Amino acid sequence: MTTNDIKQLITSLTQANPSEAARIWINVAANKSLAIQVHEQLTHEERQGLAQKLLKADNKNGNKNNNLV
């Protein structure tokens, strides 16, 4: 995957609603190497925003047993 592709993924993650971000991140995380590359390219603020979106998506799906916070 090119740097441009990774930047596009990051743009998609940052612009997505929590459910969409979770769906995208699940697909990214299926490839450990890609997940590391995307994570390394995220700014601190983007990482925090993604974590918040994933937490919201998780809570929306009724998972009350998470340990993200």
Image (tube, rainbow, N blue to C red):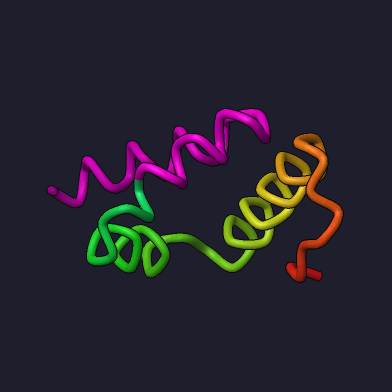
Determine the residue positioned at 22% across, 41% down.
Answer: 5
Q: Residue furthest right?
A: 64
Q: Up-down: is 3 above or below 8?
A: below
Q: Up-down: is 59 above or below 44?
A: above
Q: Residue 36 placed where, x, y %?
A: 33, 68
Determine the residue positioned at 67% across, 52% down.
Answer: 49
Of residues 67 and 3, the one drawn nearer to the viewer in this rendering: 67
Q: Quadrant of the C terminus?
A: bottom right
Determine the residue positioned at 36% across, 42% down.
Answer: 27
Of residues 48 and 60, the one drawn nearer to the viewer in this rendering: 60
Q: Does the magenta stretch include residue 13?
A: yes
**Residue 10 figure quarter:** top left
Judged left or right of residue 33, residue 58 is right
Determine the residue positioned at 45% across, 33% down.
Answer: 12
Judged left or right of residue 8, residue 57 is right
Q: Residue 9 placed where, x, y %?
A: 36, 40
In this rendering, the count of numbered labels is: 0
Q: Residue furthest left?
A: 2
**Residue 8 figure quarter:** top left
Q: Residue 14 placed where, x, y %?
A: 56, 40
Q: Does the magenta stretch include residue 63?
A: no
**Residue 65 figure quarter:** bottom right
Q: Residue 60 placed where, x, y %?
A: 80, 35
Q: Up-down: is 36 above or below 31?
A: below
Judged left or right of residue 9, residue 20 is right
Q: Is the magenta stretch mostly helix, strand or loop?
A: helix
Query: What segment is highlighted magenta in the picture?
Result: 1-27
Judged left or right of residue 38, residue 11 is right
